Amino acid sequence: MSWPLLLAVVFGLGFALLAAMMRRRELLRMEQTISDRVQAVRQGAAKAQLQHPVVDLSRCLGCGTCVDVCPEDGVLEMVHGQAVVINGARCVGVAACERNCPVGAITVTLTNLEERHDIPVLDANLEAVGTPGLFLAGELTAHALIKTAIEHGTAVAAEVARRKAAGPPIEDNILDLCIVGAGPAGLACALEAKRLGLSFLVLEQERAVGGTIAKYPRRKLVLTQPVTLPLHGRLDQVEYTKEELMEVWQDVVTEHELPIRQGRVFSGLEQRVDGRFVLETDDADVVARHVCLALGRRGVPNKLGVPGEELPKVAYSLLDAHSYRDRRVLVVGGGDSAVETAMGLAEQPGNAVTLSYRKESFFRTRAKNQNRLEEYVAQGKIDIKFRSEVQSIADEIVQIKVDSDDGSAVEEIQNDDVFVMAGGTLPFELLKNSGVSFDPALRPTQELLSERGTGLIRALGVAFVLSLLALSFALWHLDYYGLSAADRGAHPKHAYLRPSLVVGLWLGISATAFIIINLLYLVRRSPKNRFRLGSLQLWMTSHVATGILAFLCATLHGAMAPRDTPGGYAYWALVVLLVTGAIGRYFYAYIPRAANGRELELTDVKTQLSRISEEWDQGQRLFNQRVRDEVLALVEKRQWKGSFLSRVLALCGVQRSLKRTLAALEAEGRTQGIHKRQITESLALARRAHHIALMAAHYEDLRSILNSWRYLHRWVSLLMVLLVIVHVWYALAYGAHYFADGPEVVR
């Protein structure tokens, strides 16, 4: 007896130690994630400038699929068992998270459309509101992906063809469509227009096709997902560099003989009374019935507005880093373009590269670029100056003002070249004069994104109807199901209701089929397989429905009386799966949602603590900072480092550490002569932050306890599958012999 007892103690303690270590690791990860989110909120990076994901926490199951499929690191992370947007500024709009969420809890959308004046007002056909026949496509619509640009261009040409076919035949030499811009959107529009038999012309101000892509640095990766070009087909290559994609564009133009006038600068358009457009260029005007503006969003490069910016050594793009060697280079900017430019120049022999950015850290760069940049900095190839701004540029030096906690100082840097990568400004006046409106009041009303709930009522309704049908069937045959197992053999219905024949057998086969379909959801959900039949949301719905149907069919298959057999054990395992699945799908989301709600509230309080002292003098600001640091340290200890028991005691009112800390801070404030109102305001926010952190920690403790349903659900499902296999084998091997002469013994 001693040996089994000793082994049980060792294994039990080992399991408890492993669970505690994993729990501690999870808490540390969440602490870092929340810290990253707080920093992103402070820097304005929590939401993207264009598209970003919005998570409906009332529906999120915490499966983590969205995090796995997101091509950019740091956009989404798991916090308290649910997906949370951490750095929305890194979102590139691929929307893989939206497509792959099994419960439809994520929507990728444009931000603050009701307030923004930098996004054109378009209808569902990409037509400018107020100017019929004028369409926009690609980046100009605030969608940055090449794939989306191609889809836009294709859709515009299709809409023009539809309108032409619906109208009366017109015999003249007027173009059906004029396309401005030969980037991805413009070329896709031209290809589709040719496929549909439209008369069209493409105007491009550059001498090469490709649009903004043509201005990218050498070897830059510009396409990382498959797209389909009209007339050309699918581009299946996993990754394309700038040169490879430019070659594809040029081949497409040559092969299909697209009418492109290059080197023609578009300067505006006017719509005549008859509805036709007159497009003005630096050469000759063009008349067309419809216009597609695919100009891109780069526009005019933003300038620094400092003395010396007009010098020849200042550039706003980098085409070939290999042309710069043994140079002292300054790159200004904090986006991917600036970082990639700095790294490209740092790779060349003899270059000394300095990267200047006005904020305290990068937040819009992709994670891959961020990681590479850190390697370059560690190797001494790039010197980064955060919180810095260029003051002036001279032939051999650049003056930069660098801010620090101790104040500001102007530094002189020896310099040969300056690259300003600070983005661009849309040609708003040109677009407005052409009939494009940016007035949010004209924008079609969009449904505000809000929590839609778990869908519990609808699911319960469907489950109730299915269960009612099963109950009705059982009551219909109550004269058989109401008998004992020994008496059923003599009943006339035994011939087709028993598990081995006719209805009973087909109910068993149906239950097995539903179980198989139910398990196929796991295969469909995995991002590693190529099985993509149907949407993941449809599969999640079928996962729930087949689970219920399998249970009901198994209940009737077992003749309402499961026995002490492998089939009976499989039935009870199925019951456990149904219960744990219901917890996971509909009830479990409440606690993580409450915990994340507290985290968002805590972030707001921390932000208030940081902002209330903006109008205070230096001494008052120092006091507020001291309050903030002391309380946040206490919050961190209570939320992430404290034990479950210590939090329970704190919740019950034993908050000596908080009272002691606040009392000491209040006395310190009085000693320093801080106004009573300011002391009260700071300490009230501090007390609130501590309370919210305590509540968030308690919700997390409860979530971690309830999280055991996942493991129970997984292991019981494996057990059920094994029992079903044994049950089927047992029935096939022995069932026919037993069922031939007497009452069933296999359920």
Image: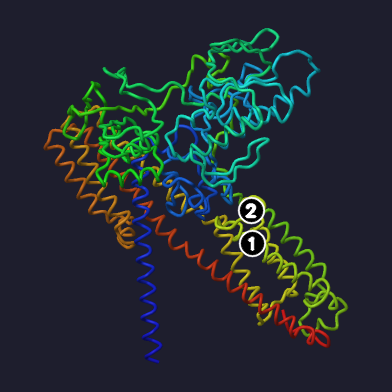
Indicate the secondary structure of the residue bearing disc 2.
loop
Q: CA distance from mark 1 to mark 2?
A: 11 Å
Tag shown at residue 532? 2
Compare residues 159 and 490 and report the one nearer the observer: 159
Compare residues 109 and 216 and report the one nearer the observer: 216
- Relative to 566, say whether 329 is above or below: above
- The image quadrant of residue 481 is bottom right
Tell me if mark 1 has few (under 14), some (14-19) or many (20+) residues whose alpha carbon lies within 10 angstroms of its own: some
- Relative to 692, say whether 561 is above or below: below
- Relative to 329, say whether 473 is above or below: below
Q: Which residue is mark 1?
A: 520
Compare residues 313 and 700 and report the one nearer the observer: 313
Q: Residue at x 49, y 37 (%)?
A: 243
- The image quadrant of residue 24 is bottom left
Q: Residue at x 78, y 15 (%)?
A: 170
Q: Position of residue 282 (x, y in %)?
A: 53, 11
- The image quadrant of residue 351 is top left
Q: Position of residue 146 (x, y in %)?
A: 54, 35
User: Which three-letter amino acid code belongs to the residue tagged 2?
Assistant: Arg
Q: Position of residue 29 (x, y in %)?
A: 36, 55
Describe residue 574's horizontal placement relative to residue 196 as left or right: left
Residue lying furthest left: 671
Residue lying furthest bottom: 1
Quadrant of image for the N terminus: bottom left
User: Which three-letter amino acid code belongs to the residue tagged 1?
Assistant: Leu
Describe residue 743's horizontal placement relative to residue 280 as left or right: right
